[in-house]
Structures are given as structure tokens and as C-alpha cells.
Image: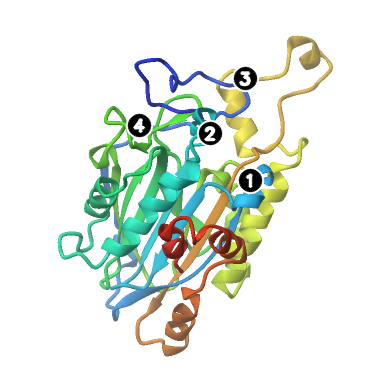
Amino acid sequence: MGRLSIPHPHRLLLPSPSPLHPSSSASTIPRRSRFSPSAHRQIRSELSLSCGSHLVPHPAKVDKGGEDAFFVTNHNGGVLAVADGVSGWAEQSIDPALFSQELMANASGLVVDEEVSYDPQALMRKAHAATSSVGSATVIIAMLEKDGTLKVANVGDCGLRLIRREQVVFATSPQEHYFDCPYQLSSEKIGQTYQDAMVCSVELMEGDIVVLGSDGLFDNVFDHEIISIVSGSPEVAEAAKILANLASNHSKDPNFDSPYSMEARSRGFDVPWWKKILGRKLTGGKLDDITVIVGRIISSSDSREGERMEEKKGISEVTGERMEKKKGDNPLHKEMHYR
């Protein structure tokens, strides 16, 4: 993740640009937007999500499972959410994972709240208000109504791709203050709030594929690679795992010209001039925690897919190890990483 964006009276948390960890460029788009594939509208039955998920922690954070947190639930049409803890808090001897974990634990428990009903921005507001851990995180929440409307609220550089007929037909844009400084919900009052979220509404069709992830995915994997994998993998759990592992492999490859390195060069970060003369350029992936959720839009009448969704309530091997180590210290760990 990037540096902190929360100024502190003693400048302890004041961000500074870094050539090593630029984030993706943020484009200027309306805060509220709606994508509606009118040419493909159809009369349909109730829709829901069949989901698979996978988390690969940063190589240096494997022992604690990383600083990303997520949950997936089939409540109503389905709710997907990812929070990426801002690693800069570690410089203040604060575990960056605690804020993202508590935020997701609160959100997972609030999806049934009547005030939240199909409103990811309201869910973000209530979950953030209930979070007491010190820290900050980028966060994205997507909620599917049974009529096929997917509502998304996003703060920072977690992202979503909607894939239809092997094309990306909708994508969120990252929000940032400047290079490597994304918007983030924080324990500090001067951070962003739910009101800063980019809110989108998307009309889905049966067979559409939704890919949700932390920036560790989108900094290291191109959209055409995502399309190839989710279109060629019949199981959403398999697709999520393949994508996460591909992102992990790319992140460790110094010669891979990743979306991350291409963005860095476009922002003016590159090798010294004398290396350019030798034909060299800045390349490589970005080491990070990587969270991937893949959801296929299905008819609620498809019992076979419905049963598959029910099977995704367990926890991943990585997060399972972390929870076993810490569940005696913090009861919130018992609630994390629902599927």
C-alpha cells in the first residue's frame, strides 16, 4: 500500500512521495455515475452472486497474514468488500491490519441493518463509525440487488472490474491525493469519510463476472490477463486463486513491465538518464498484499450454483492461520474474511 495521507500535528504521519510505490492514476469522473447496458437489457429472474476469493500476503507479512481484509456474504443478492490497511502506520508501531480487519468485521455484521438496505455508502458510514482501532484503509464495497443492480462505494485504490462477453465493460477509477497517496478511511478526523466515496450503480446480466480486489491485484495484473483467466476458469474459486497467484508472481519479477511500473514512468519516475542511454527503463511489479474476489452473476433459481455459494463460508488457509494465532487476543479475528 502507499504512504499515509493523514497529516499529524507533529508531522509523524505526513506523507511524502516515493518513487518506489506509486499508485495507479486517478481519472476525473463524476462521484456518482451509472452504467446501464440498455442494449442488453432482458427480462430475468432474480440474480445473485456465486463467489470465490483468495488472499496472498506480502512476502514480508506472511507470518501475520498481511494487512488486507475482506468478506463475502450471500445476504440478499450478495455483498463483497475489501479493505487494504495502510502500511505506513507500522512506522508508528501500529499494526496496520487491525483497522482494516475491524472495519470489515463491522461491515459484515451490519449488512442486515435496515438502514443499510442495498446502500454500500451507508454500510461504509456505519462500519467506519463503529471502528475504534487506530489506522486507516482504502475500501470498496459492492452490493447486488436481486433485480441485477450492483451498487458500489469506493474510497481509495481498491478496484472493481465488470466483465461481459470477454470484455471489461465497467471499471472503477482509483482516488488519490497525489502519487502513492490514495484516499482512505481513517481513525483520524482529518481523513476521508463515506462522503468522499465514489458511488456507482451498474446494471448486471446473468453470466457477467465481477472481479473485486485490492491494489495488489490491479498494480500487477493487466485487464486482458484478468479477462483471459476468468473467462477460461469454470470455477470462480479457481479463477480467484489463479489471479492472486499471478499477481504475486508478477510482483516479484523485476523484469515484468507491470501496470505499476508503467504508471510510475508516466508520472516521471524512471531509471537515471545514463541507464536510459543504455536502453533501460523502470520495470517490475509491486510487492503488496493481494486480495481477489471473483463473482459470477447467476439466476437465483440455479440450485447448483446456489449450493456452491453456500460452500464459500469457510476461511482461507492464510487467514485461518492468522486467526488461530490471534483469536485469543482479539475476538474480532474470529469474524474476519467471511466468504
Mark before the other along the chain sequence, 1 or 4: 4
Q: What element carries label 2?
A: helix
Using the image, determine if residue 168 lies above or below residue 314. above
Camera-side residue: 98 or 21? 98
Q: What element carries label 4?
A: loop
Q: In this figure, which residue is indicated by the disc labeled 1?
A: 61
Q: What residue type is labelled 4?
A: Thr
Camera-side residue: 39 or 56? 56
Q: Is mark 1 on a helix, strand or loop?
A: helix
- Asked whether residue 210 appears in the rendered view, the answer is no
Q: What residue type is labelled 1?
A: Lys
Distance CA(mark 2)–CA(mark 3): 25 Å
Mark before the other along the chain sequence, 3 or 4: 4
- Residue 338 pos. (x, y %): 44, 66
- Residue 172 pos. (x, y %): 40, 46
Distance CA(mark 3)–CA(mark 4): 22 Å
Q: In this figure, which residue is indicated by the disc labeled 4?
A: 28
Residue 90: which numbered mark, if any? 2
